[in-house]
Image (spheres, rainbow, N blue to C red):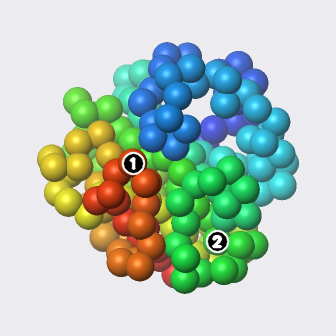
Amino acid sequence: MIRPVTRQLILEGTGDWTPCYMFGVRERFKWFRCDMWLEIIDEVGGVGYVPYVDGKRVGQMFFLPKVYARRIGLPTCRTNHDLEKTMVIGCLMVFREYMNRGLASAMVRSLIGFCREHGYTRIEACVDPRSPEEAGIGTSFFPFRKFGFVIDETSFGWEFRPETRMCFCNL
């Protein structure tokens, strides 16, 4: 089951720690409770999805408009300057033991629907173009490919992971 990230989840926290390259911190509550996420929910209507299996949180996806992503230094495609109509996936991950169950795809599918409903015309994400096994904890390109995303070879992803690239899908 995929649930949207709510105001309550932001204010109360997600519970246990989840690894995420988006912020590079182990103390997740410090960034998660910041006002930016509440501002984005108020402005856009959402900031992410959380998959649950048997009532247990088993991953996460966080997204934000490109204007916010640029403001906080997230990697984005260099070739697209439509900040107002582009959504950026800052973090997409599923715990290893729950991979290959369609959870990442369900979150991407939910985001595509959200973006269409809210007038966004493009989605960007930082991915590792290698296979999911080689990518490890990094976000593999695999769940994006089936939705029409393409790799932007001119836009690098995380500077500390030189193999990463940006990918995008025009809706």
Other-residue count near label 2 (Cα within 10 Å), few / some / many at <14 / 14–19 / ≥20: many
Q: Identity of the amino acid at label 1?
A: Phe
User: Which one is in front, 17 or 60?
Assistant: 17
| Residue 149 image point, x, y percent | 39, 74
- Residue corresponding to mark 2: 86
Q: Position of residue 125 (x, y in %)?
A: 47, 62
Query: In the image, is residue 15 above or below residue 157?
Result: above
Looking at the rendered structure, the kind of residue marked 2 is: Thr
Relative side of 33 to 4, left or right: right
> Which residue is painted at 55% across and 38% down in the image?
23
Would you place residue 51 above or below residue 129 in this image?
above
- Disc 1 element: loop
Quadrant showing the C terminus: bottom right
Residue 160 badge: 1
Which circle marks residue 145 in the picture?
none
Residue 154: image location, x then y, percent: 41, 79
Q: Determine the image quadrant of residue 136.
A: top left
Which of the marked residues, 2 or 1, is nearer the chain's N terminus?
2
Q: Which of the image's four quarters has the N terminus?
A: top left
Q: Vertically, is 137 above or below 67?
A: above
